[in-house]
Image (cartoon, helix red, strand yellow):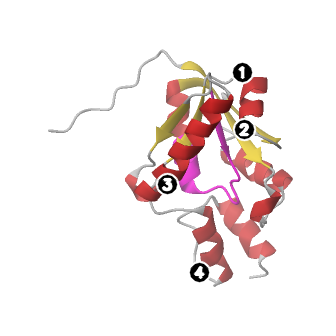
Amino acid sequence: MIFPVLYYDMAMGTIIYAGTFDPITNGHLDLIHRAVVLFSRVIVAVAKNDDKNPLFTQAERIEFITKSINNLPQVEVEGFDGLLVDYFKKRGGQAVLRGLRAVSDFEYEFQLALMNRKMNEKFETIFMMPTETYTFLSSRMIKEIARLGGNVSPFVPSHVEQALRKKLFL
């Protein structure tokens, strides 16, 4: 039996969707679009994690996301540096959104959620699976496909595809 998806008109407060987003993918955008149905405000928090050696600067990643969600007024995009628990407290979040693609994601994300809650007992994590179409997507894969000259247009917004080609001199 197929159950209809019900959308309630009683969105909760603020959820923070934090990540590196290097670059933003259609899988990330899928979660953002679904989160706006559940929360009255979604903050996409772009981490400045230099340890990951991002291809794009934090400012470029913020610009890509902002351009991708310009039709969603309840979504804010901003950068942050430091611990997510500190940012969460500063922005008054009710929860943090984390995407799960596979069981391997869950192990890491579960450990991270527990550590964050240990540092701040009000820190709640909501895990959301992407739509089946995007379960295999990762920014790392997208960059690898682009580096090797493959077509990434089904996986990222067109302005991100163009930026990848320019950055990688393709």
- Residue 124 in sight here: yes
Toward the viewer: 50 or 138? 50
Badge 2 marks a residue whose secondary structure is helix
Q: Is residue 16 magenta?
A: yes
Q: Compared with residue 68, is residue 137 higher up or lower down, i.e. above or below? A: below
User: Alpha carbon of mark 1 to alpha carbon of mark 2: how far?
Assistant: 12 Å
Magenta highlight range = 15-32
Query: What amino acid is labelled 3 in the image?
Result: Asp
Q: Tell me which numbered mark, 2 or 3, is placed earlier along the sequence.
A: 2
Residue identifier under label 1: 92
Task: Find out whether the residues at labels 2 and 3 contact each other: C-beta distance under 8 Å.
Answer: no
Tell me the element at label 4. loop
Q: Which residue is mark 2?
A: 84
- Name the spot of residue 91 as percent of width and height, x first: 75, 25
Which kind of residue does numbered mark 4 sit on?
Answer: Gly
For the N terminus, give its image quadrant.
top left
Label 4 vs label 2, nearer the camera: 2
Q: Is residue 103 left or right of residue 64?
A: left
| Residue identifier under label 4 | 150
Q: Position of residue 111 (x, y in %)?
A: 55, 45
Q: Which quadrant holds residue 66?
A: top right
Identify the image quadrant of residue 8. Answer: top left
Mark found first going from the N terminus, 4 or 2: 2
- Name the N-terminal-most of marks 1 and 2: 2
Looking at the image, tell me whether mark 3 or mark 1 is earlier in sequence order: 1
Distance between the alpha carbons at the discs numbered 4 and 3? 25 Å
* Label 2 environment density (alpha carbons within 10 Å; few <14, some 14–19, many ≥20): some
Q: Secondary structure at mark 3?
A: helix
Q: Is residue 69 above or below residue 92?
A: below
How far apart are labels 1 and 4 at the CA level? 41 Å
Distance between the alpha carbons at the discs numbered 3 and 1: 26 Å
* Three-letter residue code for mark 2: Leu
